[in-house]
Image (tube, rainbow, N blue to C red):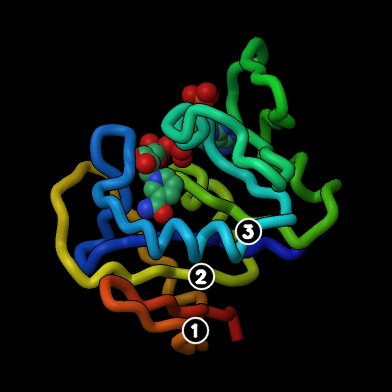
């Protein structure tokens, strides 16, 4: 089983998405995401992939979809979370809400950018913290603070 790190940015109300996109434009957080995931496989839901619109460079892009006909150049497609067990880690789980929920029992650690400001939107992150009692601040920025959460 690979080591799975979920990486997410959420606001104080647990908002993560708005109308299929990110609710904010925070270049510093995108830079943090890039620095952290570069060189590693990233796994996402089909909706998050469509939102990004292209495979992210210098990372193996894996998309989870139930649609057996779905494909995209430069993307490895899987149809069930069961396929993850055969992969080699570390792998970054990059969302969205449905994927975080579906994979939550498999996730080893969370890397959360806590966005300081509150935004408007429609997609929220389900609570995970109860199973991840150990947390530490990893990075502080002007508009967000990164915390790492571990199971024990
Ligand atoms: N703030 C952040 O850090 C962050 C990160 C990522 C995304 N987001 C935002 O989150 C929103 C998208 O999230 P979302 O929850 O709507 O969609 P999502 O999790 O990106 O994708 C959902 C899709 O994944 C596939 N899927 C889900 N569970 C599956 C399973 N068990 N087996 C096979 N396929 C499965 C299905 O694809 P099919 O319909 O093709 O079958 C489903 O429609 C966007 O607004 C995005 O910008 C935010």
The residue lying at 37 percent from left, 57 percent from top is 27
Image marks 3 and 2: residues in contact by CB distance under 8 Å: no
Name the residue carrying label 1. Answer: 138
Number of labels in the image equals: 3
Relative depth, front residue between 96 and 85: 96
**Foreground: disc 1 or disc 2:** 1
Does dot 2 land on a helix, a strand or a loop?
strand
Distance between mark 1 and mark 3 Cα atoms? 15 Å
* 63 with respect to 52 (left or right): right
> Dividing the picture into quarters, in which one does residue 106 lie?
bottom right
Percent of width and height locating residue 57? 65, 42
Name the residue carrying label 3. Answer: 37
Does dot 3 land on a helix, a strand or a loop?
helix
Percent of width and height locating residue 85? 80, 50
> Dividing the picture into quarters, in which one does residue 36 lie?
bottom right
The residue lying at 52 percent from left, 33 percent from top is 49
Distance between mark 1 and mark 2 Cα atoms? 9 Å
**Residue 111: assigned label:** 2
Relative depth, front residue between 8 and 103: 8
């Amino acid at each position: 089983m690979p080591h799975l790190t979920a990486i997410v940015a959420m606001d104080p109300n647990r908002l993560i998405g708005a109308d299929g996109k990110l609710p904010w434009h925070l270049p510093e957080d995108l830079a943090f995401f890039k620095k952290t995931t570069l060189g590693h496989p990233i796994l996402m839901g089909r909706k998050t992939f469509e939102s990004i619109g292209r495979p992210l460079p210098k990372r193996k892009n894996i998309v989870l979809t139930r649609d057996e006909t779905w494909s995209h150049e430069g993307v490895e497609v899987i149809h069930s979370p069961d396929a993850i067990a055969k992969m080699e880690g570390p792998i970054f789980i990059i969302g969205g809400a449905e994927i975080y929920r579906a994979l939550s029992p498999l996730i080893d650690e969370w890397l959360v950018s806590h966005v300081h400001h509150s935004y408007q939107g429609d997609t929220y992150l389900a609570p995970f913290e109860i199973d991840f009692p150990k947390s530490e601040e990893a990075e502080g920025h002007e508009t967000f603070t990164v915390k790492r959460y571990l199971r024990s």
